[in-house]
Image: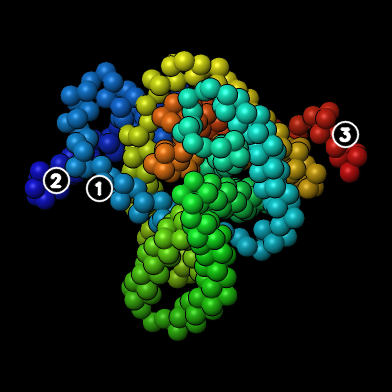
Amino acid sequence: MNNFHLATHIFLQLSLILIAIKIMGYLGQRFFGQPQVVCEMITGVLIGPSFLGYFWPESFTSLVPKQTIPVIYCLAQIGLVLYMFVIGSEFKVEVVAKRLKTATAVASGGIMVPMLLSGILAIYFFTGAPYFADNIPLFQRWIFLGSAISITAFPMLARILHEAKLSHSSMGSIALAAGSLDDVTAWCLLAIVVAIFSNNPVVAITAIFGGIGYALITLFIIKPILKRSYDNSTSKQSYFGIIMVLLMLASYVTDAIGIYSVFGAFILGLAMPRGKLTEEIQEKIEPLALYLFLPMFFIYSGLNTKFNLIFEGTGLISLAAVLIIAIFGKFVACSMSAKLGGEDTRSALCIGTLMNARGLMELILLNIGLDHGIITPNLYTIMVVMAVVTTLMATPIFNWLRNKQSIAVPFFDSLEEAK
């Protein structure tokens, strides 16, 4: 394919993908109560090698030739960055500040409990199961599994709350804050594993301290500059252009230091001045991100997923073990932490449900482990299935809980009395 033919095929490819997403979105919402974001994730799997490529390989090759995959990847990254910038710019910092203690407690519970339980899996996977490279010691397996199980689908969590119009609520703010803290910690842990595996501690140091430095510079230096530019701006187009340059630079910097561009975009969004001009920027970006670029993120991830590997060897038993530990470690721990932090039972269970969704942030982490030779395709597949199952659970349970006036859980009530 020359560049002209590549561009022509991309236009057709995007048209067919977006049609498939619309159809799946209608079916998923109409008959299964799933939000658009989950339908897009499933569409990615169906278009990938697990379904279309398995049953109709020639059609799969025609629709997604190898030359187009890097283009889909780039579009996916742009969509994720634009969307997370919008989420950050809408984020109510003052609400989080009031509930920071609870958000920190939820994030801590969602990390420490999965990390402890992952030790059991690490020992099991260390004794003959073909899930890690032979030269990976038990400690690294434990840290990798803990990172993978403790991670939260931050973009998906944000989008579910956005579609439910709960992003600005106390519960939504706690979930978003806890999810972001949770994921930053998971990425730092992953950086440590990669650093140990590559015998390069600079990787971990750069990710941790570089991320802290980026956040401090953005929130305490760039934010006041943006405020002055906002107050003195006479041209909406000029201000919009400046923000786009900063967004691309923020994404580059956070990708380069190893904490992923989504957090760079989100933190830059936090630094945006609140007001009419920012709202107009949101209105320009959000539809394009939601309906064109962001779906490519789910499509690209689906192209790298192969579910048939789950049936090899003891894969099903391993999957059951992963699901039990993942759900207990996140849902129960985060719900209990939220309850102890002062949330009512219904809100605490909603927060636990959202934190339990892994989504495609999980796939990104798994791809890093696979690319570095830390895990095998077998474990990759098991963890992908876990991500899909926990994400599919999130919306129906969340909606059921949200529509309840009140919920009584004896154990949770005893926690409140003990407190």
Instruction: Give the residue displayed 22% in from the left and 23% down from the top.
Output: 57
Residue 54 falls left or right of residue 224: left
Q: Is residue 258 above or below residue 64?
A: below
Mark 1 near mark 2, Cβ–Cβ under 8 Å? yes
Q: Residues within 10 Å of mark 1 (few under 14, many from 20)?
A: some
- Marking on residue 142: none
Q: At which x and y percent is residue 319?
A: 54, 22
- Quadrant into which the C terminus falls: top right
Q: Which mark is residue 6?
A: 2
Sequence-wise first label, 2 or 3: 2
Q: Quadrant of residue 221?
A: bottom right
Q: Which residue is mark 3?
A: 414
- At label 3, counting other C-alpha atoms closer than 10 Å, the crowd grade (few under 14, some 14-19, many 20 or more) is few
The residue wearing badge 1 is 71
- Please state which of the two labelled residues, at mark 3 or mark 1, is closer to the viewer: 1
Horizontal and vertical percent position of residue 286? 40, 54
Q: Is residue 264 visible?
A: yes
User: Of the residues under marks 3 and 1, which one precedes in the sequence?
Assistant: 1
Is 357 or 23 nearer to us in this picture?
357
For marks 2 and 3, give the CA distance. 62 Å
Q: Earlier in the sequence, mark 1 or mark 2?
A: 2
Amino acid type at mark 3: Ser
Where, by quadrant of the figure, is residue 232 drawn?
bottom left
What amino acid does circle 2 point to?
Leu
- The mark total stands at 3
Quadrant position of the N terminus in the picture? top left
Q: CA distance from mark 3 to mark 1?
A: 54 Å
